[in-house]
Image: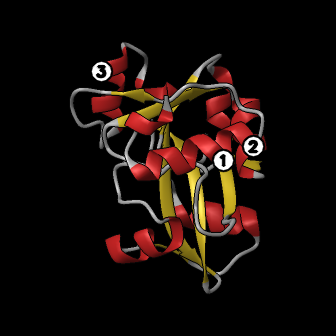
Amino acid sequence: MTDSLPARSRAVAEALAAAGVPGRIVVLPDSARTAAEAAAALGCEVGAIANSLVFHCDGAPLLVMTSGAHRVDTAYLAARLGAGSITRAGADEVREATGQAIGGVAPTGHPAPLRTVVDTALAQYSQLWAAAGHPHTVVPMTYDELLRVTGGTPSAVTPD
């Protein structure tokens, strides 16, 4: 079944299975590089899209799983984490940290575990959708499954 998936998505499927997350990866006919594209393709609210964003924080990559309904306030998040500045990683840095390209970064399936923050705004949705390693693949999961698969820290990522 996973043989028909792109290689990066197969790695994500294996990591999800190892974490006990039952979601099956869905291959979309068109790109879902943005939360709006993914929500339109899936027929869900944009806020239920769990965006995977990679930043630099205290000299290391930081994965932030955030709701597609808003942007990460990096100064606010840095203060919440007690960290120095948080800056956006470039495309090459994202691929190096995750093994995946921007627009398809999954919450798991990376070469090594990443420090991860999971946006508490995602908890309001019974089903989330996250990229699955390729711009045309997504996977459903719950908020609790997202926390489990990432080992992430729940946090607001923008002031209310």
Q: Marks 1 and 2: CB-CB under 8 Å?
A: yes
Query: Marks 1 and 3: CB-CB under 8 Å?
Result: no
Residue that badge 3 annotates: 41
Place of residue 40 in the rendered image (x, y in percent of width and height, measured from the top left): 29, 20
Mark 1 residue crowding within 10 angstroms, few (<14) / some (14–19) / many (20+): some
Residue located at (63% from left, 61% from top): 77
For residue 18, the mark is 2
* Dot placed on the residue nearer the N-terminal end, 2 or 3: 2
CA gap, disc 1 to disc 3?
24 Å
Disc 1 designates what residue?
Answer: 15
Task: Check disc 1 and give the amino acid type.
Answer: Ala
Which of labels 1 and 3 is toward the front? Answer: 1
Which residue does the image show at 62% across and 32% down from the upper left? 122
What x and y, as percent, mark residue 120?
A: 69, 38
Q: CA distance from mark 2 to mark 3?
A: 28 Å
List x then y, in percent, for residue 5: 40, 38
Q: Nearer the viewer, residue 103 or 112?
A: 112
Q: Residues within 10 Å of mark 2 (few under 14, many from 20)?
A: few
Nearer to us: label 2 or label 3: 2
Q: Secondary structure at mark 3?
A: helix
Q: Residue at x 76, y 72 (%)?
A: 82
Q: Is residue 11 left or right of residue 123?
A: left
